[in-house]
Amino acid sequence: MSRRVLIRLCGSGDPAKLHEAFAEVGWDKPVALFERYVQEHAAMSRHFLLAEVDGAVAGYVTLVWRSAYPPFAEDGIPEVSDLNVLPRFRRSGIAASLLDHIEQVAGQRSPVLGLGVGLYVDYGAAQRIYVRRGYLPDGRGLMYANQPVPTGETVPLDDDATLMFTKQIDRHS
């Protein structure tokens, strides 16, 4: 049986649906977060896409046009920020489809796309998909809250500990 996958812009009616879908699996994704993403999309500072499978929320991705990571901001590199696929839809191409769409959007403005990925086991699938898609570490080492971690420094291994990646993308795809 074929499933119908739809990748579309996230609209004002979607934040509650996203919150409910992620709450069902125990993830704390407040409605206010998704409402902010919708507002930032309307203000053209973020691009916000939703994935649905047969009408059910499957995941989402956002792209910020001005990264909070200083090297990306200085070079005008947009950043994939907050890609999530619900567990029951993983390993079915949803993340790849979301990335295909967001790379195409980014390619209209920049030849390079960036992202940060966490370092602990919850990010293992993300680490693998990004490398398979051609993202490479930017060579600046471990970041914590978008700032370099000096040699010998100790930081918590949480969502703020990241390795930053970039990818050359086709500007006209």
Image (tube, rainbow, N blue to C red):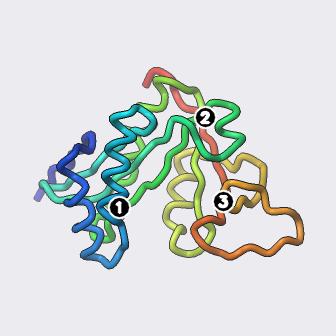
167 displayed left or right of 50:
right
Mark 1 vs 2, N-terminal side? 2
Q: Mark 1 points at which residue?
A: 85
C-beta proximity under 8 Å, tags 1 and 3: no
Tell me: residue 104, above or below residue 171: below
Mark 1 vs 3, N-terminal side? 1
The structure residue drawn at horizontal position 46% and vertical position 42%, both measured from the top left corner, is: 63
Question: Of helix, strand and loop, which one carries label 1?
Answer: strand
Kindly identify the amino acid type of the residue bearing the numbered disc 1.
Val
Q: Name the residue under label 3.
A: 145
Kindly identify the amino acid type of the residue bearing the numbered disc 2.
Ile
Q: Where is residue 53 in the image (x, y as percent from the top left)?
A: 19, 55
Tell me: residue 158, above or below residue 165: below
Badge nearest the viewer, 1 or 3: 3
The structure residue drawn at horizontal position 69% and vertical position 76%, both measured from the top left corner, is: 156
Kindly identify the amino acid type of the residue bearing the numbered disc 3.
Ala
Task: Say which mark, if any, is on residue 77.
Answer: 2
Report the quarter where the N terminus lies. Answer: bottom left
The structure residue drawn at horizontal position 27% and vertical position 51%, both measured from the top left corner, is: 51
C-beta proximity under 8 Å, tags 1 and 2: no
50 displayed left or right of 112:
left
Q: Position of residue 109 (x, y in %)?
A: 51, 24
Task: Say which mark, if any, is on residue 147.
Answer: none
